Structure formats: structure tokens, C-alpha cells
Image (cartoon, rainbow, N blue to C red):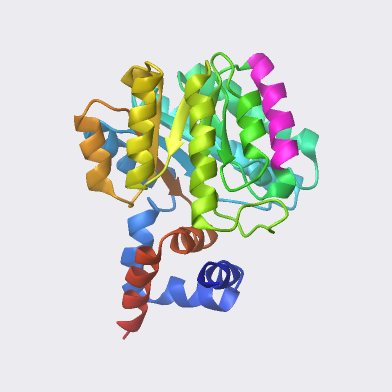
């Protein structure tokens, strides 16, 4: 219920204005978002890479409604990739792309073509692209576009969401040689007909999917902050004789940074998902919906408003 309320608040322009204009909440935003510009993204990336972490950068922007805005999102990524290469931050830093930002909801061909340009630019920059997964209505479209992109750039990765009932089958299809797959729990409000609703069901699905990816021939990217799932990932990697460079853990910027560094110290690859851009509000609200501790931190900041 609380999660649904927070996700509903993500669509409230009034609450967005409150968050944006309250000085006390700036620390909350800064905790989870690198900033609004490419320079901000580079600054945070340099610091993380210096600590032995790898990075995936997401320019925040969803539900693009015009071809002009979609092209602008493409241009942002092309500039970001060029800047990362010039700064010597590739291949440690890659990029994550939401196809909705490239016009997926109104023109799939446009989204595919723009994504292909980004993937080609990433290849030239010596790094990779991972396609983010959004609500369940876009899953088939995203996987179809992925298949087309991989014809030219096989290293293109994709996220899958364990709370969707279909994801176990998707993992079987995506576990082939060289396939880069980010396994996360999922952060969108979905109906029971397509998604598991309880935490236990989602966790069980996550483990089933994890096993399929570890047993396959691809490159699993385990996106979780849950200590139990991290431990299971470590155990399953040993069971399937995967070396530390044959899979990775992924965590969000600002969430459990000490754990990120602990895993790096133990020899694991840890990739930090770093968002930046002016459209940070929806992203922030989904992060709050995922973890009650994040919400408590946020509410304390609001209560301290002067």
C-alpha cells in the first residue's frame, strides 16, 4: 500500500515542486542523483572509479512525446559517451538507456534507430550499453529491439525484472553466449496478473532467474542490495565455477556504498547505477518506494523545512 502511494506521488506536480524548492531535501536528491549535467556525471564517475568501482550512467528522461525530444535524448548520450572516452573513463563506465526516452511509446522504429546510434557510439568509445526495462507493457518491444541491436553490437545488455511472472522464461532465452543481462527486482506498480505481489514471491523468482543466468553462457549482472540475495549470488557463482570477472553485482548510487566497497575489496566487480539530469523526480520517488529506510530519510528532511 505504501509503495503504491509513493508511486502515485511520483505523478504529482505539486509534490515535485515541494521537493524541488525545499532546501532540506536537496541532500536527499544529491544522495541518489549525480546532478543535472554531463560534468556532474563525470565528477561522480571519476570518484567511483577511483574507488575501484565500475559505473553505468543513466540520463534521466522518460515518456518522450516527440521525435525532436527523442533526438535530443540521443544527442545527450552521444555527448556523454564522447566525454567519457575523452576522460579515459571507458570501459569502466558504460551507459544505461530507457527506450521510452527515445520515443518507444509512439514510434518503435525511431527508438530502435536512435538506440542503434548510441550503441555504435558506445562501441567506438570502447564501452557498452544496457537497455533499461520499464513497465510490463514495453517488455516485448524492448526485447525485440534488443535482438535487432545485437545483430550489429552483440555486447548490448538488457535489464529484466524478477517480479514479472514472465521473467524466468525470458532469462532462459537470454542466457546464451555473451548475453549481458541485468537482473533486478522491479520498481513499477504492476497488476497481479503479470507480476508477483509479495516480497517472498519476488525473492523466490529472483533466485530462480539468478540460477538460470549463472548456469547459462552469458554475463549475469545481479542488481540487488539485499544481503541474502548477494550471498546467494556469491554461492551460486562458486557452484557454477564462475570467476569474479564472469559476472558482476550492481547497486544504485547512494544505496549501501559501504557494501559496494566491501564487495570490491573481496575481488568482485561492482557496478554503480548513476543517474543524472533534470528529470530526477520520478527516479527519486521509485527509489523511495523500493526501500522504507529511504522514505524515512526523505520525510525527516521534509519535516526540517524552514
Secondary structure of the magenta portion, mostly? Answer: helix
Q: Is 146 contained in the magenta span?
A: yes
Q: Is residue 103 left or right of residue 210?
A: right
- Residue 186 position, x and y percent, is 55, 49
- Residue 131 position, x and y percent, is 59, 35
Q: Which residues are magenta?
A: 139-152
Looking at the image, which is closer to me, 16 or 271?
Answer: 271
Q: Quadrant of residue 85?
A: top left
- Residue 106 position, x and y percent, is 80, 47
Q: Quadrant of residue 291?
A: bottom left
Outermost residue, bottom direction? Answer: 306
Examine the rendered structure and indicate whether residue 153 appears above or below residue 136. Answer: above
Q: Is residue 251 left or right of residue 80?
A: left
Q: In the image, what residue occupies the spot 75% across and 37% down? A: 141
Q: In the image, what residue occupies the spot 55% across and 40% down? A: 76
- Residue 153 position, x and y percent, is 61, 17
Examine the rendered structure and indicate whether residue 125 appears above or below residue 204. Answer: above
Amino acid at each position: 500500500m505504501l509503495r503504491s502511494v509513493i508511486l502515485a506521488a511520483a505523478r504529482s506536480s505539486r509534490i515535485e515542486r515541494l521537493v524541488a524548492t525545499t532546501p532540506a531535501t536537496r541532500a536527499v536528491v544529491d544522495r541518489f542523483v549525480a546532478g543535472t549535467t554531463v560534468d556532474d556525471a563525470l565528477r561522480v564517475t571519476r570518484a567511483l572509479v577511483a574507488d575501484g568501482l565500475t559505473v553505468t550512467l543513466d540520463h534521466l528522461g522518460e515518456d518522450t512525446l516527440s521525435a525532436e525530444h527523442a533526438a535530443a535524448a540521443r544527442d545527450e548520450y552521444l555527448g556523454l559517451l564522447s566525454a567519457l572516452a575523452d576522460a579515459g573513463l571507458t570501459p569502466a563506465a558504460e551507459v544505461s538507456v530507457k527506450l521510452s526516452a527515445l520515443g518507444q511509446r509512439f514510434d518503435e522504429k525511431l527508438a530502435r534507430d536512435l538506440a542503434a546510434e548510441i550503441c555504435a557510439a558506445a562501441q567506438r568509445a570502447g564501452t557498452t550499453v544496457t537497455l533499461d526495462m520499464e513497465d510490463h507493457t514495453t517488455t516485448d518491444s524492448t526485447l525485440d529491439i534488443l535482438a535487432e541491436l545485437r545483430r550489429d553490437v552483440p555486447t548490448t545488455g538488457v535489464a529484466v525484472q524478477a517480479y514479472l511472472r514472465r521473467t524466468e522464461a525470458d532469462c532462459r532465452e537470454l542466457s546464451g553466449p555473451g548475453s549481458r543481462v541485468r537482473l533486478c527486482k522491479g520498481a513499477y506498480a504492476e497488476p497481479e496478473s503479470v507480476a508477483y505481489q509479495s516480497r517472498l514471491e519476488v525473492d523466490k523468482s529472483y533466485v530462480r532467474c539468478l540460477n538460470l543466468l549463472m548456469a547459462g553462457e552469458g554475463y549475469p549482472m545481479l542488481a540487488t542490495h539485499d544481503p541474502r540475495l548477494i550471498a546467494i549470488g556469491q554461492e551460486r557463482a562458486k557452484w557454477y565455477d564462475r570467476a569474479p570477472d564472469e559476472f558482476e553485482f550492481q547497486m544504485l548510487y547512494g544505496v549501501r556504498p559501504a557494501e559496494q566497497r566491501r564487495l570490491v575489496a573481496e575481488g568482485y566487480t561492482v557496478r554503480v547505477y548513476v543517474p543524472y539530469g533534470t528529470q530526477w523526480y520520478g527516479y527519486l520517488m521509485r527509489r523511495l518506494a523500493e526501500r522504507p529506510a529511504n522514505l524515512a530519510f526523505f520525510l525527516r528532511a521534509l519535516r526540517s523545512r524552514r
